Amino acid sequence: MAMQSLLSANIEQLENSFEAAKGDYEQLKLIDKALRHHADKSVLRLRAKVAAEIFRMKREAGAFSSIPSPPPTSLRALLGRFGLDAPDGRPLHRYRLGADGYDQLTVLLRQRAAQLGNGNGSDAALLVLWASAWFRREYGGGIRKYRELRKVIGATLERHEWPPLIESGLKWWKRPVVERANGRHWLLTIAVEGGFPERVLQAGGGWLARYLNEVVGRLLGIAEDLSADDAFAMADAAKEELRDTYRQEAFIALVADLALAIVKLRRIAEAAAPNLAPSAALDQVRPGWREELPIAADTDAARALVDGMLAAKKIPRGLSGGAGCVRVLRRGEKGWSTGLRLSLGGELRADALAGLVARGTRLGVHPYGVLARALGEELAFLDPPGEDGDSWRLRPLTRRTELDDVPLEARIEVLIQSPNGATRAMPWPGGSPERSDVITFEIDTEDKGGPAVLVLAAQGSASLRAERVVVTAPADWSVRWENEDAEGAPESIGTTRDGRGLWLADKSVLVKSADGGLLYRIETGVDEELRDRIVLDGRSPQGFDCADDFSLFADPPTVNCYRGRTSTNPADNELLWRRAPTDQWRELARFRLPVGVVDIMWRDAQTGFVRDRVRAAIVPHSARVIRERDGEGWRYSFQGFGELAISPERTTGLDVEQRPDNVFILSFRSNPLRRVTFVLRHQTARARSVSPCRSLCVTDSRTGMAGLCRLDRR
């Protein structure tokens, strides 16, 4: 039966075709290919039967024989083993030399070692193929050196002779050279072409296994059909786990290819035998499945790696698998509400808990602040690091990780508690308040009514791989297609309880403020994701630190701008600031940032698009708060605040005695309050401060912007 007929056939017809094709290898391959296009789960059993018959025929034909084949005498003979007449541009690791092929090629190159420098293209091609396999099988980390390769095959090549030889060999195989800002990297290219370094895997659960499992876990968190672009996007997003030398597009693409194959096999295993380990299920329903993978699973380390990836835990969309959280929007009967997706896995570094508890003591992790109102139970405990470790491992205690009614602007914090009662509040990774004018969400789940659960993807202007996104902005802002010739308009799909509008977009859009002063662009379906951002860097005030939704600095901070991971220098007229919405924007290059609360904006001079906008509070460099015991109460001295006038807000149960020079004596008629609010006034600005003098809050009277700073109680 022809391929076109097979594609249009139903399951019963395909069953009959399979029975008739037994013993016909080529027809079985066509049937297997046709079955892959059927979305119906009922084809899984037939696919397993077809795969088993193909495997049987290969085995009987000797395809899996361990008897060594004769050494290749030419590249054509070598390609013939893979059914090729010429290189097809595949990465070198996909040629699957195996142990025998590697040994034979090593012997051949030792025989030709003396003539490798003669410029023979065939020798160069054989050399890079062998070298890539050597790095996969033998490389154990550290700096890659030519002399390691030279020593194995007895070559006499000098250092300067290797690059042209490698370039010639790669060109023969139709493979590119890895390039960085500082030039081309020859040995790195060979190492990446070889695939996963097996000796690194043999050392145990290291960086590579963590990275691979995270990529698979993220892909498992995507409900819809996966594409190669999805896999690359997830592998690229998780690349912080990679060693610097492997943070390359070629290696990330290799990981994406492997992870995508693993996830597809995992879903087949779960559909066929959900109660079995995935690898065991595949052994039953899909014999020879390891041969389908883009990695040679011919060593214990590689098999362990593959089995570990198959068993990787699903990571919900928006999370990384470690400690963290991501904002979500959920559609319910009463409309859209803001929520939180919480992750309680991974580790926390010891330096974050320094001084809280002695080594060897287990710590409790409790919700704090807004999180405590959404989740009233202990979150996890922290196991201490070993004698030579520096990280505490999280052990979850709650299964409630999908939380409702958590405002976007809420800071997500936890309380770390030791058995002796000592506590420390700390921000949870990913829990910074979200106050951007424009926030874009990716679609996590849909139903008949459209998008149902959304996961935060970007703030401000952004370029995203997703084809369809939901853009949120103040309800009175306008959202339109960037391409003026496009038909229709982005679909409005509702509003959140806090007054944000939601628009569904399947192409690039422009988002404009009601007064026309701010313009953002959200691009969709791009090949490379870019998020423009402003990063502020400066000195923190002495005696207190920021605990609200923007950073606090002693003296104006340095303003750094990034496009993705790359630092960039905007033009003078692109970095602007203002203190209130009614103020004119001023160029940062001409006007120094003042004391108070300011907006800082990076706006493209040509298009007018706002790349990013942040808010910061600035106090004089001399500002400090001193806390001292005073009889039954506490004395707080606000020193070096310049012209800022400071006064506490009256609260039931709090007695305040104000003395000259911004000194306050606080006492309590009942239990001490956890927070006391102060107000700082400076002509057009006022600031609020909170806590028995544990925190300070700065508010601009015209903008309503506030910054909370926690005082050091020690």
Image (cartoon, grey):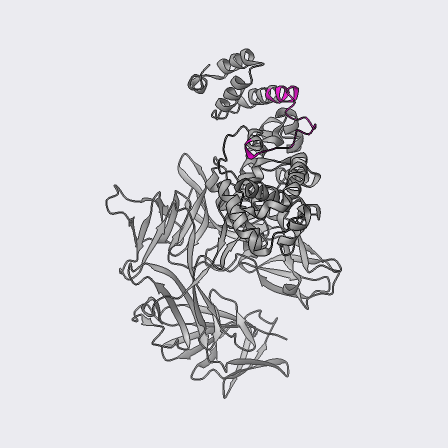
Residue at image point 53% right, 38% down: 260
Q: Is residue 20 magenta?
A: no
Residue at image point 59% right, 51% down: 322
Query: Can residue 220 be seen here?
Result: no
Residue 624 picture location, percent across and down = 53, 80
Q: Is residue 560 above or below residue 625?
A: above
Residue 250 picture location, percent across and down = 51, 46
Which of 494 and 205 lies nearest the eye of the viewer? Answer: 205
Left or right: 52, with 14 as reference point: right
Q: Is residue 64 magenta?
A: yes
The range drawn in magenta is: 54-76
Residue at image point 28% right, 44% down: 489
Q: Quadrant of the C terminus?
A: bottom right
Left or right: 309, with 484 as reference point: right
Left or right: 419, with 158 as reference point: right
Q: Is residue 96 above or below residue 433?
A: above
Which of 607 and 275 lies nearest the eye of the viewer? Answer: 607
Q: Main secondary structure of the magenta part?
A: loop
Residue 613 picture location, percent across and down = 39, 63
Which of 279 and 578 lies nearest the eye of the viewer? Answer: 279
Which of 421 and 545 lies nearest the eye of the viewer? Answer: 545
Q: Is residue 535 above or below residue 310?
A: below
Query: Can residue 68 be seen here?
Result: yes
